[in-house]
Image (tube, rainbow, N blue to C red):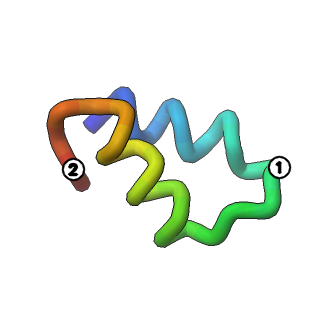
């Protein structure tokens, strides 16, 4: 989803792994990758 892609791009400088970013996105939005 565009929202998840946006979130991953903007959190990419953080310390979370890709899996953690996916989980974070899922917890924030109503849909998962």
Q: Position of residue 27 (x, y in %)?
A: 34, 43
Tag 2 or tag 1, which sits nearer the N-term? 1
Q: Is residue 11 left or right of residue 32?
A: right
| Residue position for label 1 | 13
Q: Position of residue 4 (x, y in %)?
A: 39, 39
- Displayed quadrant of residue 1: top left
Residue at point 80% right, 52% down? 14
- Displayed quadrant of residue 22: bottom left
Distance from disc 1 to disc 2, alpha carbons, whole Å, reads 21 Å
Q: Is residue 8 left or right of residue 23?
A: right
- Element under label 2? loop
18 vs 20, nearest the viewer:
20
Q: Quadrant of the C terminus?
A: bottom left
- Of the numbered discs in the image, which one, if any, rests on residue 26? none
Q: Position of residue 32 (x, y in %)?
A: 21, 50
| Residue position for label 2 | 32
Residue at point 40% right, 58% down? 23
Compared to 8, does 19 lie above or below? below
Compared to 9, does 2 lie above or below? above
- Element under label 1? loop
Residue at point 72% right, 50% down? 12
Kindly give the residue lying farthest to the left in the view shown. Answer: 31
Q: Position of residue 6 (x, y in %)?
A: 50, 31
């Amino acid at each position: 989803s565009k929202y998840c892609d946006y979130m991953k791009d903007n959190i990419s400088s953080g310390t979370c792994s890709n899996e953690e970013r996916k989980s974070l996105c899922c917890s924030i939005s109503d849909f998962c990758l």
